[in-house]
Amino acid sequence: MRVLISNDDGLDAKGIQTLAETLSGDYNTTVVAPDRNRSGASNSLTLTRPLQPIEVREGQYRIDGTPTDCVNLALSGAINDQEFDAVVSGVNHGPNLGDDVIYSGTVAAALEARHLGRPAIAVSLVGNTHFDTAAKVVLFLIKNLIKDSHTLALPPKIILNVNVPDMAYEALSGFKITRLGHRHSSQPAVTAHHPRGVESYWIGALSEPYDAAPGTDFDAIKNGYVSITPIHADMTCHSVLSTLEDWAGSISI
């Protein structure tokens, strides 16, 4: 099976290199990742200039663009005209829990892969130490999701958002299928010092969750479980369609 690996932390990040080393023992892997940290890039594409894939080492390419750019180019055949059977995005440095997925370049890369017809997994380590644990989790999931020699058995248009506790693999409590929790609103922007007195700010940090009930990804991580959340890109709020249809039918221009 040919696996494309990407991320949003950059080609030289420890997470993606650990993942590539782990998966390459069993699968044909290619790494295509941004040339620098692009955390928070979400689903953005670079449309105002050309992109330049550069092979840094055998089977590993950096692109001066976003995570979505990387997956888009790789799956369109721009990287040595290769084709891929599945895509793994990560291992992200830090969590992608609850509302984090709105901003995450890691999740966006997986969604781009699914949009282009490939099964995909986004994986994040809720910490910054045990990247080997997260890589082993991905290897375990792939081995258990393969339905034939080169296809992952995932529903159409669905990706798996996987978050892994920062602990040794043997210490994990197991796996839980979860829903996304929710965080409080982000903290206020922070004033940044500028040597020339220009008004500058850092975006505020993420807040703690307000919905971390049993069944959420936050709760699974808290209790030492790997959280696996199915995600799709359909943002339609189906539950209010009929209400809005009734409202629209009652008004006139």
Image: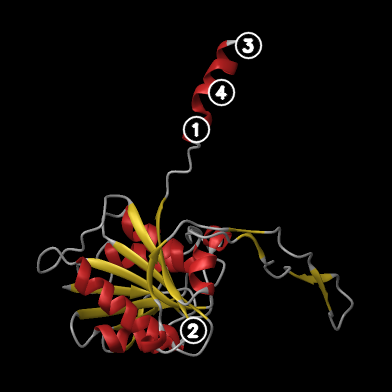
Q: Amino acid at mark 1?
A: Ser
Residue on which disc 3 sits: 251
Residue sitting nearer the eye, 64 or 18: 18
Q: Of discs 2 and 4, which sits in the foreground?
A: 2
Tag 1: Cα neighbours inside 10 Å, few (<14), some, or many (≥20)?
A: few
**How far apart are labels 3 and 4 at the CA level?**
11 Å
Residue drawn at 48 percent across, 68 percent down: 220
Q: Amino acid at mark 3?
A: Ile
Going from N to C along the chain, the mark reached first, 3 or 4, is 4
Residue drawn at 45 percent across, 64 percent down: 107
Q: Are marks 3 and 4 in contact (CB under 8 Å)?
A: no
Residue on which disc 2 sits: 166
Residue sitting nearer the eye, 219 or 200: 219
Residue on which disc 4 sits: 244
User: Where is 70 relative to 169, above or below?
Assistant: above
Tag 4: Cα neighbours inside 10 Å, few (<14), some, or many (≥20)?
A: few
Instruction: Give residue 239's mark.
Output: 1
Quadrant into which the C terminus falls: top right
> Residue 35: where, in percent of width, then height?
47, 80
Quadrant into which the N terminus falls: bottom left
Going from N to C along the chain, the mark reached first, 1 or 3, is 1
> Residue 208: where, in percent of width, then height?
67, 67
Going from N to C along the chain, the mark reached first, 3 or 2, is 2
